[in-house]
Image (cartoon, helix red, strand yellow):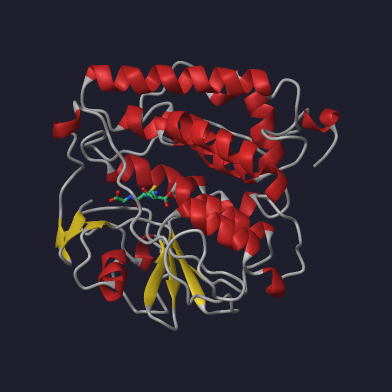
Amino acid sequence: MGLLVDGVWHDQWYDTGATGGRFVRSESQYRNWVTADGTAGPTGAGGFPAAPGRYRLYVSLACPWAHRTLILRALKGLEAVVPVSVVSPLMGRFGWTFDTAQGSTGDPANGAATLAEIYVAADPHYSGRVTVPVLWDTVRKTIVSNESADILRMLNGAFDAFTDVATDYSPADLREPIDRVNAFVYANINNGVYRAGFATTQAAYEEAFRALFAALDELEARLASRRYLVGARLTEADWRLFTTLVRFDAVYYGHFKCNLRRIVDYPNLSNYVRDLFQVPGVAATVDLDHIKRHYYGSHGTINPSGIVPIGPELDFGAPHDRSRFGGG
Ligand SMILES: N[C@@H](CCC(=O)N[C@@H](CS)C(=O)NCC(=O)O)C(=O)O
């Protein structure tokens, strides 16, 4: 794992020295938007009109942030409109690679060997982390966005002319409560598991751990009286929570030391995660093999042997009790 400094790759682990052992996620640097007509979106510059086949999504099947974009792409029926390249699950000294022997699809669009090459192709002087997901413009040969929250909304709304699926997962009338839940889930749960797992002091770990389980307890209570997080509708807020929950028992509980409770120990959260997993199209986006190989195999400071545990047994396809709320 490493980062680019002025376009040059440096193999180094996260530096938590300046932040009291706390892991602080860096801000995404590409924040442009694909829009239906190419006008600028909420941030960045315009000039990225939606078109079939023009944009390629670079993802890791292991990564929860990339996973949200894959789910929206599947739910919106955009598989043929926005092609995907999958990186190898192992993030080693060259960062994300297109090693097909390890499970990558390769990079037919740019013929790159590493994701860092894509970042350098967009900007020869790029400095920063080389993260997935990336939305790449094959016409302008640049990165439109490397922020999953934004890419999620582009897939939800910008490509409607090229799909029959009209479902809106971020409806304007629910934006405010969706944004509120997203902020809570991001800070305490999505990023919370990383803050626990990548902490390098006991205090930083405990701070993240306590906030994580307080938040899970709160959502467990919230989901006792409603099927989804916001209103009666399935929204992007649910998908953003789902990608962390579906990894929790297999990875975060052990590898990131988030071991107060498993998701299977929460009646509502465990039924909820099965409910979401069983939405048509979603199961095919969940790859527990890539997920486990990535985390246990890539973080040498946390798991030096690289041994990937065999368990636990998980059955997201088992029946759930969420239909009693209606909807869905
Ligand atoms: N804010 C970004 C975060 C993406 C992110 O951190 N992805 C991880 C994989 S789960 C990554 O590529 N990390 C590589 C690194 O930090 O060097 C987003 O949500 O799109």
Q: Is residue 199 left or right of residue 166?
A: left
Q: In which quadrant will I find the C terminus?
A: top right
Number of numbered callouts drawn: 0
Estimate the x, y position of residue 256 in percent, counting from the top left: 36, 29
Q: Is residue 290 left or right of residue 279?
A: left
**Quarter-of-image position of residue 71:** bottom right
Task: Please report the residue visible at 62 percent of the width from the left and 74 percent of the height from the top.
Answer: 80
- Picture layout, residue 94 above or below residue 36: above
Task: Please report the residue visible at 44 percent of the width from the left and 76 percent of the height from the top.
Answer: 137
- Nearest the eye: 257 or 183: 183
Q: Is residue 8 left or right of residue 40?
A: left
- Picture layout, residue 48 above or below residue 276: below
From where the camera sits, is residue 213 visible? yes
- Nearest the eye: 312 or 37: 37
Q: Is residue 21 left or right of residue 83?
A: left
Estimate the x, y position of residue 187 in percent, counting from the top left: 43, 32
- Picture layout, residue 74 above or below residue 172: below
Estimate the x, y position of residue 98 in percent, counting from the top left: 34, 67
From where the camera sits, is residue 267 visible? no
Estimate the x, y position of residue 120 in percent, counting from the top left: 25, 71
Task: Please report the residue visible at 63 percent of the width from the left and 59 percent of the height from the top.
Answer: 156
Task: Please report the residue visible at 52 percent of the width from the left and 64 percent of the height from the top.
Answer: 41
